[in-house]
């Protein structure tokens, strides 16, 4: 198995860069652990500060197009960082509203992800034999 193929190379560089940074900030750790982009972190923190936000509100505040926000929201939902609720509008129709997972819970998720990674790396190290 080629661990340094192009598909995995950027992920390893991110971890390596994070480990080599004397004092990484929280966003750097989030980006690495969740494999998300800076603007997805912006979306998470916006929703954390503005619960029950709509795509339109997020899009207008961050000055990003709706489709980019939709992709970001899907990524954040997949990571367990936000939740979506269905809201029926008074004149008919519906919209989705988004609420962020509280920061303490997000930190726990990050810790769990790091533990999974650590366990996987530890198993690889323990299986290593001199050839």
Image (tube, helix red, strand yellow):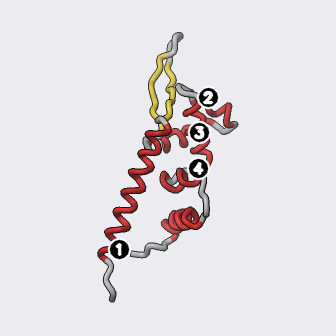
Position in image of residue 125 (x %, y %): 35, 74
Nearest-to-viewer mark from 4 and 2: 4
Q: Quadrant of the C terminus?
A: bottom left
In the rendered image, which residue does mark 4 sit on?
A: 27
Judging from the image, what secondary structure is the residue with disc 1 in? Answer: helix
Residue 77 visible in the current orientation: no
Label located before the other in sequence (4 or 3): 4
Please rate how many residues cluster around mark 4, counting C-alpha atoms within 10 Å: few if below 14, some from 14 to 19, many from 20: some
Looking at the rendered structure, which numbered label has been put on residue 56?
Answer: 2
Judge whether residue 131 can be spotted in this image. yes
Res. 22 image quadrant: bottom right
Q: Residues within 10 Å of mark 2 (few under 14, many from 20)?
A: some
Left or right side of 20 for 100: left
Pinpoint residue 75: horizontal percent, then vertical percent.
49, 44
| Furthest residue toward bottom | 131
Give the distance between the C-alpha atoms of the residues marked 4 and 1, in whole angstroms. 29 Å
Q: How far is disc 4 from disc 3 in space, using C-alphas?
A: 12 Å
Q: Residue furthest top?
A: 91
Which label's residue is closer to the chain start, 3 or 1?
3
Q: Please tell me the numbered disc located at residue 43.
A: 3
Q: CA distance from mark 3 to mark 2?
A: 12 Å
> CA–CA distance between discs 4 and 2?
24 Å
Q: Secondary structure at mark 2?
A: helix
């Amino acid at each position: 198995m080629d661990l340094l193929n192009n598909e995995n190379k950027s992920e390893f560089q991110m971890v390596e860069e994070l480990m080599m940074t004397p004092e990484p900030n929280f966003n750097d750790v989030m980006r690495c652990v969740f494999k998300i982009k800076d603007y997805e972190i912006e979306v998470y923190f916006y929703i954390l500060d503005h619960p029950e936000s709509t795509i339109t509100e997020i899009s207008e505040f961050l000055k990003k197009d709706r489709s980019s926000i939709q992709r970001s929201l899907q990524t954040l939902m997949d990571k367990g960082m936000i939740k979506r609720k269905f809201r029926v509008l008074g004149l008919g129709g519906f919209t989705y509203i988004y609420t962020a997972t509280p920061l303490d819970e997000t930190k726990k998720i990050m810790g769990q992800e790091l533990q999974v990674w650590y366990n996987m790396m530890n198993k690889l190290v323990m299986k290593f034999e001199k050839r």
